[in-house]
Structure formats: structure tokens, C-alpha cells
Image (tube, rainbow, N blue to C red):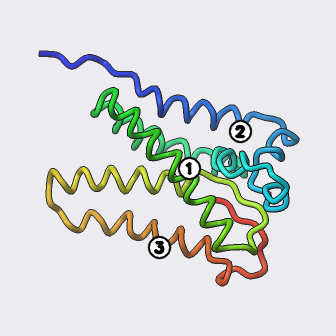
Amino acid sequence: MSRNLYLPWASLFILAVGCAFYAAPPAVQDLLIYDRMAVEQGEWTRLLTCHFLHIETSHFIYNVLPLLIFACVYEYTHGPRGSLDTLLLVVPTAAAISAWVWWQTPGVMYYLGFSGVLYALMFVAFYEVYLQTRYKWLFVIPVIYLVRTIWQLDTAFNPVDDGTYF
């Protein structure tokens, strides 16, 4: 019995948005980045759009490759439910990261990047492998990334910098 090929539409959509934002002119990117002053003036969409921006080509590649690996594989193995799960994970995670930056790191004036969301996708993937194998050491990797992300968001460790990216 052969498995039907399932197109990971949610991951491909997220990837397409990231590519479009990356290819956008700098003036357009400036309208999408997390800018604390702009958000204070009511530009709340920046709280989500900032996650799809990348500061340079290597940053873009480091975010795209894991998305292709974790999200696409997750969607493929879970079918249509995997696409819904991916969207239900990406959007709230992006919102939670932006809320953290907004309330817990008031010194961060600018922010962009998708890595925090990727870490959440990675954590889900490792959790599913854990459920199948019961190898507890698997959680060492996502915990390291989680600690790194929290450390990077904490402006107490970087008081001179008024912006951050993942």
C-alpha cells in the first residue's frame, strides 16, 4: 500500500512569505520590522511580520533550512492535520515571542527573525521522537536552544544594543 504524497502547504506558505519579505526592498522591510515606537503608535502587525524578516543572507538561510526540515517533514508525516498544527504553532509562538520582547525587554527597540519560532517547531519534533523512542537525552538539544533564546532576549546581558535578531 503506497502513501499519498502530501504537499506541506503551511510550511511552503510560511517559506513563501519569508522569501517575499527577504526579496522586498529595504523601504518595505522597514515597514515590517519590529519597531517599538511604530508599535506604540498602533502598527501592531509588526509584532507578527518581524518574524519573517532576516538581517542578511546567512540569517535567511539558517532560518529557511530548518523550516524545510522540521516543518515540511512534520507536515508530510502528519498529513492535513500537520499543516493545521504547523499554523497553530507558528502564529501563537510568533505572537508569544513578540509579547516577550514587548513586555520583558523594553530596551529592545528593533527586532526581527524566525529562529525562536523554529526552536518551537524543533521542540515539537523532538517531543514526537521522544514519544516514540523514550530517549530522554533528546531534550538536551531544544533546551540548549531555549536557554540561548531567552538569554539573547534578555537585554541585561546586552545593555548597549537596542536591537536584536534571531
User: Which sits earlier in the primary sequence, circle 1 or circle 3?
Assistant: 1
Which label sits on residue 62? 1
Residue at image location 15% in from the left, 50% down from the top:
132
Question: In the image, is residue 83 above or below residue 56?
Answer: above
Q: CA distance from mark 1 to mark 3?
A: 18 Å
Q: Quadrant of the C terminus?
A: bottom right
How far apart are the two marked residues, 2 and 3, measured between alpha carbons?
27 Å
Distance, label 2 to label 1, CA atoms, is 13 Å
Task: Looking at the image, tell me whether mark 2 or mark 3 is earlier in sequence order.
Answer: 2
The one of 44 and 25 positioned closer to us in this rendering: 44
Circle 2 crowding by C-alpha within 10 Å: few under 14, some 14–19, many from 20 = some
Quadrant of the rendering where the N terminus is positioned:
top left
* In this rendering, position of residue 78 left or right of residue 65: left
x, y percent for residue 65: 50, 42
Q: Judge depth for marks 2 and 1 and give the one in front.
A: 2
Q: Residue at x 63, y 74 (%)?
A: 104
Q: Amino acid at mark 3?
A: Val
Q: Which residue is mark 2?
A: 22
Using residue 132 as the reference point, say whether residue 154 is left or right of it: right
Q: Residues within 10 Å of mark 1 (few under 14, many from 20)?
A: some
Mark 1 vs mark 3: in front: 3
Q: Is residue 4 above or below residue 65?
A: above
Residue at far left of view = 1
Question: Residue 73 falls in which quadrant of the image?
Answer: top left
Horizontal side of residue 98 vs 72, given as left or right: right
Q: Give SS at disc 3.
A: helix
Q: SS for tag 1?
A: helix
* Label 3 packing within 10 angstroms: few (<14), some (14-19), many (20+): few
Measuring from the top left, give residue 29's x and y in whole percent.
79, 43
Residue 71 is tagged as none
Amino acid, disc 2:
Tyr
